[in-house]
Amino acid sequence: MIRRPLKHQETSSGGQLSLGKANVVRAIISAEGRRYMYLPFGAFVRVIMVLALLTSRSVTAAFSLSPASSRQVFSKHLVSATKCRHATCQRRVDRVESSSVLSAASTLTDNSDSSSSSSPLDPSSSADDTPSEELSNKPKRKKKRRNGSKSKEKRRQFIGMAKAVDRGQWANVYTPGGENGTVFTALSGLPNRTKPFTVLGIESSCDDTGAAIVRSDGVILGESLASQNEIHEEWGGIVPGLAKNAHEEKIDEVIADALSKAGMKTADEVDAIGVTVGPGLEICLRVGCIRARDLAMEYNKPFVGVHHLEAHILMARLPVGDDPSNEEFIVPATDKTHESNRAVAFPFLALLVSGGHCQLLKCIGIGQYSIIGGTIDDSLGEAFDKTARLLGLPVGGGGGPAVEAMAREGNPKAVQLPIPLQKRRDCDFSYAGLKTAVRSVAEKMAVERGVDTIDDLSREDKANIAASFQNVAIRHIEQRLDRAMSMVESEDDGIRSLAVVGGVAANAELRTRLEALCAKREDPWNMFVPPPRLCTDQGSMSAWAAIERLMVGSSDQPSGHDVYARYPFQFKSC
């Protein structure tokens, strides 16, 4: 882009020189009008500073010197600098020959050297050669395009691939067991693991403040949760700033309440402390992390920075006594750890469906996960939330429950919607297109019904849209999960267990249909799902994940432990 000239000055030859806005801010003209010295802004400031130094005055006083005094100082102290500057200009003018002063000024401020003897003030220079200015700028613009292309090319490498998976592009990756996944280190020590120990877990990754005291044999001694549903309902979604303020207001109260329900007075009575450090909303994560770090250092307790997604996955292993259908297995005691129960043994297949994530993972051990598939755009929970807002449903308690409740009143086949990714034979998910299709159908229906907005549709129409959306969304899950099961069955590792975890796992329709999918396979699978109240974010998940880490001898240093908005698992091919 060629900048328009700020003003023009006559040369001794009658030509015009353009003083561009960008680089030239001063033109000192000699009495004869034959010599010009162009000072870029930085050079002008340096001249004023030198002027102040030479006259032993302040910078303000230097600016206020009279023109006569300024000329005397320049003549006495800066004449050699001026000559040097003028000589430098003369050597560089070949780049801007036959061009405007704007181009010349840009060249003068460039720190590259050139060897030429022609001058832009030479009478032989023509003011009509302005197209050469465009040519002189083209190489720089091309270079910028090349740099931009490299950046775009780097981003294109991951287009169409599952998000939240590290393929070498992330700085912070969750690897508690090191590169091979099996070498754990207790950076802040370990509790006495030869008998059941207690852990305080703190959760503040999004919109609810949770704390719980869980014993290492799986017993939840006390838990507390401060919901923010009323705060965010009027906004139609989570407002990070409001969520952070609510966490700060409630976190001490929630921790004290959980301790009280567990029969404890202070955090000094627990054996370790765990807190969610990512992924999530960074400003919310920081509230919980700082409080947990302070408590761990104050009472000298082992500290565990919990991975939020791993915490969801490990909740499937929590032994829940009120579900007789789940056969627990026993983890035998060792010389360092006590005997304990788990609902499901490693390895197993996990379907993680939540408000921010949608993944299929082969779970090999603590911190060891092979990503089979993931969403390439929106998660299932996000699609539920946006559909709820589109239909004008109350989203204070979450869009998923609102759509699920409305869908019970509708016909799941009333509206034709496309099942995503029918041509891709992999295990990745996509809900952006389905979300757009729902909006298009709702808008078309509003026109057909003669109403102004989607919100004005009848309850029956909204129920049919909700039911159709939920049906197709779960059908997409069924297709990808069926393919993943077949892939796992073809491998010789004996995996026949499926854990369905995350906030959306509380959806009753999803549970029912996935149970049927597991049962109808030639070699039936066992499905493990936490109770609905333990599928969503709460303190027990952080405490239990910390227990699992501590049992394998892993803990973190509380001092300076950071939080991570993005905290992917390291990619491992299956």
Image (cartoon, rainbow, N blue to C red):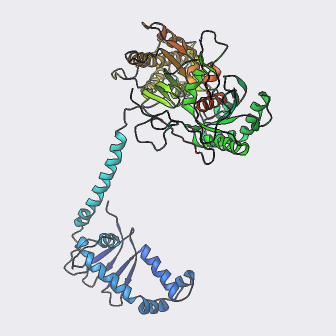
Q: Quadrant of residue 491?
A: top left
Please name the residue shown 24% across and 79% down the image: 119
Pick the residue in front: 357 or 344.
344
Res 526 seen here: yes
Q: Where is residue 108 in the image (x, y as percent from the top left)?
A: 32, 73
Give percent across and percent down for residue 566.
51, 39
Residue sitting at the far left: 124
Q: Does residue 452 appear in the picture of this structure?
A: no
Above or below, comparing residue 327 to residue 389 in the picture: above
Task: Give whichever of 133, 244 is nearer the camera.
Answer: 244
Question: Could you tell me residue 226's position as x and y percent?
Answer: 71, 32
Q: Is residue 547 above or below residue 415?
A: below
Residue 570 position by quadrant: top left
**In the foreground, 473 or 462:** 473
Q: Position of residue 105 (x, y in %)?
A: 33, 72
- Foreground pick, 348 / 423: 348
Classify the position of the N terminus by image quarter: bottom left
In which quadrant is the C terminus drawn? top left
Left or right of residue 316, residue 105 in this image? left
Note whether 400 is above or below 519 in the view shown: below
